[in-house]
Image (cartoon, grey):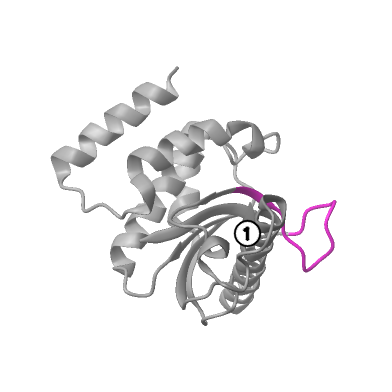
């Protein structure tokens, strides 16, 4: 099962200092760990929300570090892309996996798959027994739909204003955090359904 999906910055943004990143969108799946843990059971709803927000920020910072190391090691220069070049940008995207130990920040060990596309990071946090090849395919598919249908490459892209459309994409491509094996016919049906919704 996928525990969460994130979209966050992976390049310096003028409002942030060098090592910081901003979480632009997050969606959690599964039970709230704070309700299940004896340690956090007494927290108020607001304190639980802040705890979840901090866990997501920790994941985003670790992915930022991994993306930075990957880009530095490859030596490739980041070239600004314009809307319409989504397929090319996705093909050249940096990708990787990070293993999170138990307690850092989740109570159990987790696998984090990430794609660094220009200044954005797309991240899936999965349970360690999940099929990582399937998760990568789902992450690339989600990223492609976000880039093509929501036009996230442009400078004026407002990811925060498009959260309802991202929610719809997640409900179709990652229902309740479950990774789906898609045959060709079902994938085409989903593509048509998503395209029809995005055309609204």
Highlighted range, magenta? 12-25
Residue 163, relative to residue 128: is it above or below? above
Residue 2, relative to residue 166: is it above or below? below
**What is the quadrant of residue 41 in the picture?**
bottom right
Residue for point 33% across, 57% down:
137
Return the x and y of residue 67 as percentages of the image width and height: 60, 69
**What is the quadrant of residue 200 in the picture?**
top left
Does residue 159 appear left or right of residue 166 in this picture? right
Residue for point 77% across, 69% down:
19
Residue for point 49% across, 40% down:
146
13 and 35: which is toward the camera: 35
**Element marked by disc 1:** helix
Is there any visible trace of residue 174 in the rendered image?
no
Residue 63, relative to residue 100: is it above or below? above
| Residue that numbered label 1 is attached to | 52
Is there any visible trace of residue 40 in the rendered image?
yes
Does residue 194 appear left or right of residue 15 in this picture? left
Return the x and y of residue 198 as percentages of the image width and height: 43, 25
Question: Within 10 angstroms of label 1, few (less than 14), some, or many (20 or more) residues?
Answer: some
**Magenta run includes residue 31:** no
Return the x and y of residue 104 as percentages of the image width and height: 59, 78
87 and 189: which is toward the camera: 189
Q: Main secondary structure of the magenta part?
A: loop
């Amino acid at each position: 099962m996928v525990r969460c999906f994130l979209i966050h910055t992976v390049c310096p943004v003028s409002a942030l200092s060098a090592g910081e990143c901003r979480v632009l969108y997050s969606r959690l799946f599964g039970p709230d760990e704070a309700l299940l843990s004896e340690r956090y059971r007494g927290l108020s709803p607001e304190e639980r929300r802040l705890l979840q927000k901090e866990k997501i920020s920790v994941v985003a910072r670790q992915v930022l570090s991994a993306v930075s190391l990957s880009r530095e090691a490859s030596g490739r220069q980041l070239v600004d892309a314009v809307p319409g070049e989504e397929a090319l940008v996705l093909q050249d995207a940096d990708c990787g996996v990070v293993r999170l130990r138990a307690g850092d920040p989740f109570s159990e060990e987790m696998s984090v798959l990430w794609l660094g596309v220009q200044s954005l990071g797309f991240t899936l946090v999965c349970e360690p027994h999940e099929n990582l090849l399937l998760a990568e395919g789902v992450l690339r598919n989600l990223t492609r739909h976000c880039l093509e249908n929501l036009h996230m490459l442009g400078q004026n892209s407002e990811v925060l204003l498009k959260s309802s459309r991202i929610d719809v994409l997640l409900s179709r491509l990652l229902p309740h955090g479950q990774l789906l094996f898609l045959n060709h016919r079902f994938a085409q049906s989903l593509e048509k359904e998503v395209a029809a919704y995005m055309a609204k």
